[in-house]
Amino acid sequence: MTATMTAAHFRGNKTFSVDQIDIPAPAAGEVPVRISYCGICGTDMHIYHGNMDARVGTSRVIGHEMSGVVDADAEGFTKGQKVVIRPLDHCGDCPACDAGHHHICHNLKFLGIDTDGAMREIWNAPAHTLHLLPDDIRMDHAALIEPVAVACHDVRLSNLKAGEDVLVIGGGPIGVLVAMVARDAGGKVVISEVNKNRLAIMEKLGFDTVNPAEQDLPAEIARRTGNKGADVVFEVSGTQPGVDAMTACAATRARIVMVAIHAAKPQVDMFQFFWRELQLIGVRVYEPEDYDKAITLVASGAIDAGTVITDTAPLADIQQAFEALDASPTALKSLIKVEA
């Protein structure tokens, strides 16, 4: 008899089906991983809203912010080892790969978007994508490692130095994690956010905040930095007001890190790049060293996972979980518990 597992398929039109499917045998170079938890990320919500139908289709198991356990000895891994999957599969034969930039491969496959992912009990993943976890890590907390790795990559490429003034524009899940990683690196962090529920979470986490809907953000940043401005600005809002603020709040020779994906081309005040000798840094996903750093931060408690994770639902309730997150003014990071 063929073994089966539970998997959630995105069917289009904001709909998931929870199905029993055969467990496929791992291909050469793959490791079977039994999924523990999977986070719902902003990209998953774009898929839910139908914005990526042409890429994803209507029979995809999505999900990539995961934690799990190796399900059988394979490719040098041992059954029972706790792991996370870095969900990037590069071609190895393009100019970016030739230069060693595998994470921005010209033919990159993002696992869980371009292929089936983690919203199922068993995921056969390429061995090169697995990272081992400490034995004592909490598996729900470990599901944050993928988005924390995004933040680690962003902060690393910003060249943030201890003591510098940092502005994070946008207090969603990635913005909060960028702020925590920047604070861990010694930055003096202020978060700009308009959602009052999220502002309350930021303040619970010990961050200075500004609500630009009620306060003059550039004036506040100037006041808090002795009229200097922020040395490092992370644009995480994906909005035109956020892009306006990133140059208005920047110090002389500040580094501006474009984290957000903008649905439409924003207008950028290029004059400020000339006037203040600003730098604009593009960032995309992560590299293996960012995953290693993220594992260290989550395992050590430097990331307050208990506050960031605001709700958890079983895989059987994935439809209700997406609907609830879509409607919630208070949720920050929602997890799906995949394990039985």
Image (tube, rainbow, N blue to C red):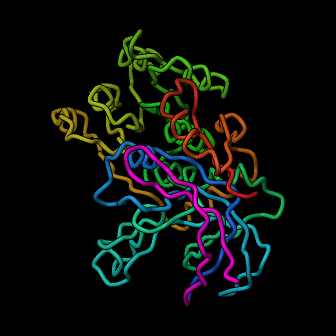
> Where in the figure is residue 82, as x and y percent of width and height?
74, 67
The residue depicted at 21 percent of the width and 40 percent of the height is 264
Q: Is residue 165 left or right of residue 242?
A: right
> Where in the figure is residue 182, as x and y percent of width and height?
55, 41
Quadrant for the C terminus, please. Answer: bottom right
Residue 114 picture quarter: bottom left
Q: Nearer the viewer, residue 104 or 333?
A: 333
The residue depicted at 59 percent of the width and 80 percent of the height is 24
The residue depicted at 65 percent of the width and 34 percent of the height is 310
Q: Residue furthest right?
A: 136
The residue depicted at 44 percent of the width and 14 percent of the height is 223
Q: Nearer the viewer, residue 167 or 105?
A: 105
Residue 238 picture quarter: top left
Query: Is residue 49 on the magenta stretch?
Result: no
Q: Is residue 319 visible?
A: yes
> Where in the figure is residue 210, as x and y percent of width and height?
48, 18
Q: Is residue 146 left or right of residue 257?
A: right
Quadrant for the N terminus, please. Answer: bottom right
From this view, report whether residue 237 is shown above or below residue 319: above
Q: Nearer the viewer, residue 133 or 322?
A: 322
Q: What secondary structure is the stretch in magenta mostly built from?
A: strand
From this view, report whether residue 38 is shown above or below residue 78: above
From this view, report whether residue 247 is shown above or below residue 257: above
Q: Nearer the viewer, residue 112 or 144?
A: 112
Q: Is residue 186 visible?
A: no
Q: Which residues are magenta?
A: 1-28
Residue 108 picture quarter: bottom left
